[in-house]
């Protein structure tokens, strides 16, 4: 059994999500709405790092409104696709490691880190690198899944992320979906420890309270049972939310 290392060729393992233009563009619109709220609409001067850029669909959408976007991923096949498909003067793609970003300190105004932490070998190193390359007072858009999510989001298997690693590997094999469960999720308490070096502003509740304002009605239809349930859980059992969206600020 291999040790927990980098997950090679992720875009080839999950093409249904990584090459889904419609879904990823919608996620990017939510990111832009959160950034516009945080920066009071002033996006054109921002230099943004998109860690785990994959096929570049989100980065390309961000580049429509922000000043510059640098996309980074270890998946060279996905980055090659991004370079072929998206060509803008303010958009650049790099093959590289988000645990060792090939950029000097204090380069970026904003970092995007959306559902990346569970895929890297050393999750503790990831926020340290983001902290290093952000300018003082810079922000990280951080979207993260909860280990206590009943339905594991990558494989659609209930309770997979709850299991000890050896049982998770076996469950994945029995389901015919792979030999090794690379993803390693954290609970809310673990995510707070992971991001403790930053000042955190929670956008999870803001988005649930007003999905339309954040272009999030694809996740939370207005006045739907799903949205009402999400509001209930966010208010009374935040630790059970399936995922979180935070803006993390590097302290000046």
Image: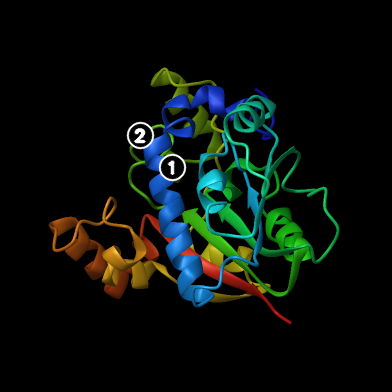
Query: Taking 31 as reference, is 200 left or right?
Result: right
x then y, percent, for residue 36:
48, 70
Disc on res. 133:
none
Colour setting: rainbow
211 and 144: which is toward the camera: 211
Please give the residue where the numbered disc 2 appears in the rendered image. 156
Query: In terms of image quadrants, where is residue 60?
Result: top right
* Vertical position of residue 180 compared to residue 91: above or below: above
Quadrant containing the C terminus is bottom right
State the CA–CA distance, disc 2 to disc 1. 18 Å
Circle 1 residue: 24
At which x and y percent is residue 98? 72, 47
Q: x%, y% of residue 99? A: 75, 48
Circle 1 SS class: helix
Q: Going 62% across and 43% down the picture, which residue do you hit?
A: 52
Relative placement, left or right, of 154 versus 200 is left
Tag in front: 2 or 1:
1
Task: Decide: few, some or many residues near mark 2? Use Cα within 10 Å; few <14, some 14-19, many ≥20.
Answer: few
| Residue 147 in view (yes/no) | no
Residue at the spot x=74%, y=61% of the render? 128
Determine the residue located farthest toward the bottom in the rendered image. Answer: 252
Q: In the displayed orientation, state which residue is furthest to the front.
A: 89
């Amino acid at each position: 059994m291999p040790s927990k290392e980098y997950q090679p060729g992720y875009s080839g393992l999950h093409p249904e999500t990584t090459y889904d233009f419609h879904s990823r563009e919608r996620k990017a619109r939510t990111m832009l709405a959160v950034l516009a709220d945080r920066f009071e609409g002033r996006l054109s001067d921002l230099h943004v790092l998109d860690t785990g850029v994959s096929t570049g669909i989100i980065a390309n959408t961000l580049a429509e409104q922000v000043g510059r976007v640098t996309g980074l991923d270890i998946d060279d096949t996905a980055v090659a696709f991004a370079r072929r498909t998206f060509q803008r003067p303010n958009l650049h793609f790099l093959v590289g490691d988000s645990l060792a970003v090939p950029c000097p300190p204090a380069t970026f105004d904003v970092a995007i880190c959306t559902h990346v932490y569970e895929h890297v070998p050393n999750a503790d190193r990831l926020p340290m690198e983001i902290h290093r390359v952000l300018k003082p007072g810079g922000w990280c858009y951080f979207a993260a899944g909860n280990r206590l999510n009943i339905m594991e989001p990558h494989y659609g298997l209930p309770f997979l992320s709850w299991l000890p690693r050896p049982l998770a590997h076996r469950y994945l094999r029995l389901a015919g979906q792979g030999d090794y469960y690379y993803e390693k999720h954290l609970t809310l308490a673990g995510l707070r420890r992971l991001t403790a070096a930053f000042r955190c502003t929670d956008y999870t509740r803001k988005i649930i309270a007003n999905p339309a304002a954040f272009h999030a009605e694809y996740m939370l239809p207005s006045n739907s049972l799903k949205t009402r349930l999400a509001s209930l859980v966010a208010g009374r059992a935040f630790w059970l939310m399936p995922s979180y969206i935070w803006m993390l600020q590097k302290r000046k």
